[in-house]
Amino acid sequence: MGRFVVQYLDENDRGCGSLDWCWFMLPQILNIAVWLTPLAALGAVCTMIGAIALHIHRKDGAEAIATNLFIIALAVFIAYSRSGLIG
């Protein structure tokens, strides 16, 4: 099963991770269920952790992993700042 999933991802990688930003901003912009913003950010963190595992498995360069780490840092910042723990 695991090999099938990795093979599927290798063949069908669409690069949808670049749309993660809209899920952070949508609840804030529409002012509907604002509590979803930190949860969306934490979901993006989980997605990027999986992406790092995939990049390591594929033996991609350090640039791909660094990009995911940058997105994780931004998502953690958004989750923390929007959770109401800051001021």
Image (cartoon, rainbow, N blue to C red):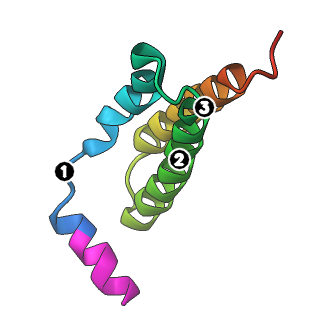
Q: Earlier in the sequence, mark 3 or mark 1?
A: 1
Q: Choose mark 1 or mark 2, whichever is in front.
A: 2
73, 21: nearer the viewer: 21
Q: Residue at x 47, y 60 (%)?
A: 56
- Labelled disc at residue 14: 1
Residue under label 3: 35
Callout 3 amino acid: Trp
Left or right of residue 62, residue 19 in this image:
left
The image shows a total of numbered marks equal to 3
Q: Secondary structure at mark 1?
A: loop
Q: Secondary structure at mark 3?
A: loop
Asked if the residue at tag 1 contacts the one at tag 3, i.e. Cβ–Cβ closer than 8 Å, the answer is no
Q: Find the magenta span and give its range.
A: 1-8
Callout 1 amino acid: Arg
Q: Residue at x 23, y 66 (%)?
A: 10
Left or right of residue 75, residue 86 in this image:
right
Q: Secondary structure at mark 2?
A: helix
Q: Residue at x 24, y 45 (%)?
A: 15
